[in-house]
Amino acid sequence: MNHQDEKDDRHGMVIGGLIVLGLGVIFLLSNLGIIPDFGIMWPLVLVVIGIALLVGAVVKRESKKEKEEERFKTPE
């Protein structure tokens, strides 16, 4: 595992931790009555997070693919 892979793994762990923390804060504020009750809307939050993670994975894959193509290019 090279340095970039380790950096990507840590980045994923930080993002996952921030998502869990954010959800916890939202539910805490909802329970305290500071923000309106999510009721039926809470699955929408999970859907939005899922879409964001998928888009992030696609963008990451594309940038990694471009970097690999640049590395294997022959100089003209």
Image (tube, grey):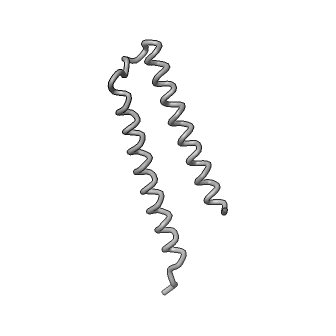
Could you tell me residue 38's position as x and y percent? Answer: 37, 22
Q: Residue at x 46, y 54 (%)?
A: 57
> Which residue of the protein is positioned furthest toward the top in this rendering?
33
> What is the quadrant of residue 44 in the picture?
top left
Report the residue at 53% width, 78% height from top.
72
36 vs 42: above or below: above
Classify 43 as above or below 3.
above
Q: Is residue 44 left or right of residue 57?
A: left
Residue 14: image x %, image y %?
A: 58, 42
The image position of residue 35, as x and y in percent, is: 40, 18
The residue sitting at the bottom extreme is 76
Compared with 42, 52 (above or below) is below
The N terminus: image quadrant? bottom right
Q: Horizontal and vertical percent for residue 71?
A: 54, 75
Q: At 46% from the left edge and 22% from the top edge, which residue is drawn?
A: 27
User: Which residue extends farthest left?
Assistant: 40
